[in-house]
Amino acid sequence: MLHIRERIAEKYAIESPLSGEVEVDESFFGVRRKTIVFGLLKRSGIVYTKIVPNCSRATLQAVIRGKVDVENTIRFDGHIGYDGLADLGYKNTIGFNMAEVNLPTAGPISTESKTSRGLLKCDWPSYLHLKECEFRFNHRGENLYKLLLKIIKKRLLNES
């Protein structure tokens, strides 16, 4: 039987696609900054995070294709991994330079900062830790205790 954290991670990892305006960003974590976390943030909504092996165009765009519908707007920084999104059918793309962002309300809300808050003290973020931070962010306005009890109860009823 899988641990409850694994069940929660499994449930929320498959939610897709993100809709509306989606911001994408990559961050490096760990003592030697070897763990790469790629995040997608739906404006005024949820975040999806994934540990990726590298920041290549193929890796980042594969995650984007799997989580963002081509009709949506994608905001990204100048990283080369986002070049060619229009060739994949994404016509609404907005590149930005982080130097242009002065106020949190004036520009993009950094996916990196949203992800970093939960992982700052973690030398090597694991998949489960990352999904826990994602779950907490995506349910920030809810009573997590009641929500977890509901998930556990539903899971136990399904196993019977």
Image (cartoon, rainbow, N blue to C red):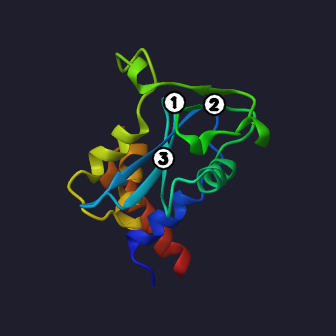
Mark 2 residue type: Gly
Question: What residue is shown with label 1?
Answer: 43
Question: What residue is shown with label 2?
Answer: 20
Q: Which of marks 2 and 1 is nearer the N terminus?
A: 2
Q: Can the viewer see residue 11?
A: yes
Of helix, strand and loop, which one carries label 2? loop
Q: Mark 3 to mark 1: distance in Å?
A: 12 Å
* Residues tagged 2 and 1 counted as in contact (Cβ below 8 A): yes
Question: Horizontal placement of 158 versus 32: left or right?
Answer: right
Categorize mark 2 by other alpha carbons within 10 Å: few (<14), some (14-19), many (20+).
Answer: some
Q: From what the image shows, is residue 78 above or below residue 65?
A: above
Q: Mark 2 to mark 1: distance in Å?
A: 7 Å
Question: What residue is shown with label 3?
Answer: 39
Of helix, strand and loop, which one carries label 3? strand
For the residue pair 55 and 142, the one nearer the viewer reads as: 55
Residue at x 34%, y 38% (from the top left corner): 113
Categorize mark 1 by other alpha carbons within 10 Å: few (<14), some (14-19), many (20+).
Answer: some
Q: Position of residue 157 (x, y in %)?
A: 51, 73
Q: Which of marks 3 and 2 is in front?
A: 3
For residue 18, which numbered disc appears in the image? none
Q: Where is residue 133 in the image (x, y as percent from the top left)?
A: 35, 53
Q: Can the viewer see residue 139?
A: no
Mark 1 residue type: Arg
Q: Mark 3 to mark 2: distance in Å?
A: 16 Å
Residue at x 43%, y 71% (from the top left corner): 6
